[in-house]
Amino acid sequence: MKKIVFVLIMGIIGFSGCKKEVKSDNPFFNKWETPFEVPPFDKIMAKHYMPAYLKGFEEQRNEIRAIITNPKDPSFDNTIKMLAYSGDLLSKVGRVFGALNSANTNDSLQAINRELAPLSSKHRDDINLNDTLFQRVKSVYDNRDKLKLTGEEKKLLEDTYKDFVRSGAALSPDDKNKLRKINEELSLLQVKFGQNLLAETNGFKLIIDKKEDLSGLPEGVIAQATAMAKSLNMEGKWVFTLQVPSMTPFLQYSDRRDLREQLFTGYFMKGDNDNEFDNKEIIARIANLRTERVKLLGYKTYADFALERNMAKTPERVFDFLGQVWNAALPVAKAEAAAQQELINKEGGKFKLEPWDWWYYTEKIKKEKYDLDDEITRPYFKVDNVMEGMFYVANRLYGLTFTKRNDIPKYHPDVNTFEVTRDGKHVGILMIDNYPRPSKRGGAWCGSFRSQRRDLKGKMVTPIVTMVTNSTLPSADKPSLLTANEAETLFHEFGHALAGLLSNITYPGSSVPRDFVELPSQIMEHWVLEPEVLKEYAKHYQTGEVIPLEIVEKLDKTSKFNIGFTTTEFLAAALLDMEYHSLTGTTDLDIRDFEKKTMEKWGLIPEIKPRYRSTYFNHIWSGGYSAGYYSYYWSEMLDADAFQAFKETGDIFNKEVAGRFENEILSRGGTRDPLEMYIAFRGKEPGIDALLINRGLK
């Protein structure tokens, strides 16, 4: 009995963080004596991660052992609560490593990631497949109606039990072993996919050495290419990469159709080049392993498994939802393609419109129709001003103040750090990392070095939130000047950041359903081009002039321009995701053929490629959106309706509506059923009409 009591006490000490502080050469083993206990990035080196992970694994194993050897009957406090608070060191090192491996990686971190993947998979399985632990969780769950739990506690108990079942805790010993092998292989394949994609993205460059080949490109775009060449020690040349801020302007403005084809082909063939970084076999294996995995767990398809916890619930409902939007968008896309072909013919072009022509001729039509292009609006969207615009909206809605701090450690010089306060009280820290670089993966995302929660004593733990984008770089003579779309991306990620900063939950690990998580981010996009907001931040970077009303009106008119294309290319990717994850059995997948047949099935026109082809679709193979890419549009159905709650009052900064949105949505995380949360805010369920109207498709 003494031994059991000793283990339990040690487990509780581990949870409470009351161990005697002993200074170590490894920063992860020390209390961080930095402002707000931000990670001391200058002291953390690659050699520190693996020892910290191994110790984190060990500490959580001891904490789990303390739970399962507790002689008392299972209860919410001694089982569910203690499980939620286990793994503090593992979370601490994992958040830092994960963030840096995505935003500032190198060969050492990638090697660690490959070594770590099977160890992490085994550690998770050792917990999720531990029958003694599961029986304690099940005992509490089976007696839940007799317990006096808060709503948040009931949700945590339900989620914990279901997570164990969905992780295979109820399987036979033989099936558990099969599951372990599948999980280990999947973890390695997902890492390899991401590393291949980064290598392919960095490996392609369009190098121009003749000035005449720059025909059609605006001065700002040329300056960007000059700066890129200089950074690569190619002075006197111009370099374009596969990063969107570099690629898209070239496709919009370059008169050289052959060079547009080269650059676009480099983009859509990422991971599909039959070389050492080819992702086709990896994808085929991941798809089959996922199918095997969910079959063991008793599901028909991976999509059935993934959607069970989402708002949509079933693949049938997702396909129906996507089909309704597809049927509204495809005729519009076809009309847009016809208009572009008409322009090609009018100009004497003797060729058929191809995907690498779309941006170029769309830009011409927009310029002709509205006398507006990105180069006219860029001077009014200086990145620092756009951030001030975001902060202005958050202040008006939620009373938040953002103060730049230069005394806080950061992982890269590009990072801007802000302390967030409300009524003079500290709320959290926000780090914003805006520019592309070879060490950063593509896209934009939001994460955290520490999430909001309360510790075991009930003390508030404040968040450290990160926002990462790949926005237009500054050039030699200009600051970073964004397109309206890039400004929208910043507001989008800021919406995620607000959800992290305004979270007000008790227990760590609260999980928001995938098709609800984009609501806080996408609703923020609605404020970007509101005249009342533009006048606060959209100021010319040289003169300080507020963006003219005529440009604002043109931006409003063009907001739905090319909507058939943008909707259809997105939906093509979402449908591709769903088709992969609706496979009912393992098969010898030919990735190119599967993709081709899927697009033919849905009738995608050849002038449009899916936003993400299979071989660089990081969201679904390595990014957590498998059978979930549809969720951006599902969430748009929510955010379009939710923003109407503000518009209906005649005040886009209505304090009462903002307070309701914070209290019922932002602050709650995953502590309540998402539909209940939405109805509590809006008073009704959302409908697809709001989405179609918002997109100009109805």
Image (tube, helix red, strand yellow):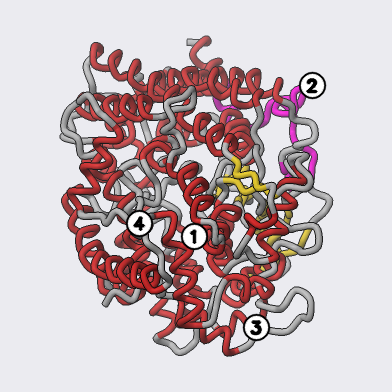
Marks 3/1: CA–CA distance: 34 Å
Q: Residue at x 54, y 61 (%)?
A: 255
Q: Residue at x 69, y 26 (%)?
A: 19
Q: Residues within 10 Å of mark 3 (few under 14, many from 20)?
A: many
Indicate which label's residue lies in the foreground, 4 or 1.
Answer: 4
Residue 9 lies in quadrant: top right
Mark 3 element type: loop
First to last magenta residue range: 9-38
Q: Is residue 641 visible?
A: no
Question: Which residue is nearer to you in this view: 253 or 395?
Answer: 253
Mark 2 element type: loop
Name the spot of residue 619 as percent of width and height, x first. Answer: 42, 43
Q: Earlier in the sequence, mark 4 or mark 3?
A: 3
Q: Residues within 10 Å of mark 1 (few under 14, many from 20)?
A: some
Residue on which the image places disc 3: 547
Indicate which label's residue lies in the foreground, 2 or 3.
Answer: 3
Mark 3: amino acid: Ile
Mark 1: amino acid: Ser
- Residue 635, placed above or below residue 562: above
